[in-house]
Image (cartoon, rainbow, N blue to C red):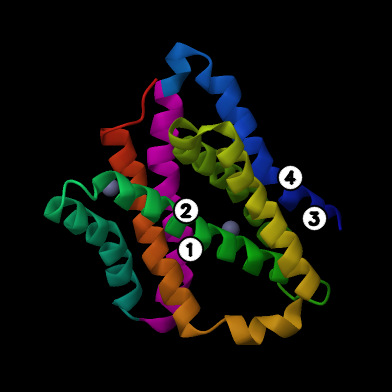
Amino acid sequence: MLYLGAALLAPVLGPALYGVLHSRAEAVRVVDGFVYVAVPLLVLWQVAPYTWAEQSLVPPLIVGSGVFLPTIIERASHALESQTDNFVILLSLSGLVLHAFLEGVAFSPGSDALRGPFVAAVTLHRIPVGLVIWWLISPRHGHPSAAAAVASIPIATALGYAVGLEFLGEWQGQGVELYQAFVAGSLIHVVFHQGRHDHRH
Ligand SMILES: [Zn+2]
Ligand SMILES: [Zn+2]
């Protein structure tokens, strides 16, 4: 239960960190730089184990299509550009929520994944997850939307914890992994696109 509490709190620390750093002009670049490094690393963390297990190039290729498909749509129609990124943000968020849900399942009683390093890794990487969500959403849609989006992460984890392991069999299909790979790519797209265009300070 202590593990679960830490994992539930961690995403909330992200926006708090953002708030502290972002109010200092010289730290803004640090936050942006951190996000540009953290997101590809988070994607790697998401996709690498599955790619390794399957010994297949399909997951990285799907990540690539998640990065470039929105770019192609934006090139094709300038009018669609702002909506594309909002849609992609929602899509990325759905992936992060699904990911947080599955982590909740892994934290449920009887899970054999509950060892120290795993728990520490899961808890720690949720801090940048919270920060990235806030970084993406609050400049575009304001603090209430960003707070709701961040809150959806611990809610999803608590839900995963509640439904528990019996559920896992149905959810750990190829489709889920490939969907996660695609939305992970789309997260990379929107982070770097926002950085180029409309992340105002
Ligand atoms: Zn875009
Ligand atoms: Zn995670």
Q: Along the polypeptide, which appears first: circle 3 or circle 2?
A: 3
- Determine contact: label 2, label 1, CB under 8 Å: yes
Q: Which residue is mark 3?
A: 3
Beta carbon of the mark 1 residue lies under 8 A of ligand 2? yes
Residue at the (47%, 75%) spot, across then down: 177
Question: Can see residue 177?
Answer: yes
Q: Along the polypeptide, which appears first: circle 4 or circle 3?
A: 3
Q: Which residue is mark 1?
A: 46
> CA separation, marks 2 and 1?
6 Å
Tell me the quarter of the picture where residue 20 sits. top right
Residue at the (79%, 56%) spot, across then down: 4
Q: Over which residues does the magenta segment extend?
A: 29-55
- Determine contact: label 4, label 2, CB under 8 Å: no
In the image, 25: left or right of 154? left
- Mark linked to residue 185: none
Q: Is residue 118 magenta?
A: no
In the image, 64: left or right of 18? left
Q: Which residue is mark 2?
A: 42
At mark 1, the secondary structure is helix
Residue at the (56%, 39%) spot, across then down: 146
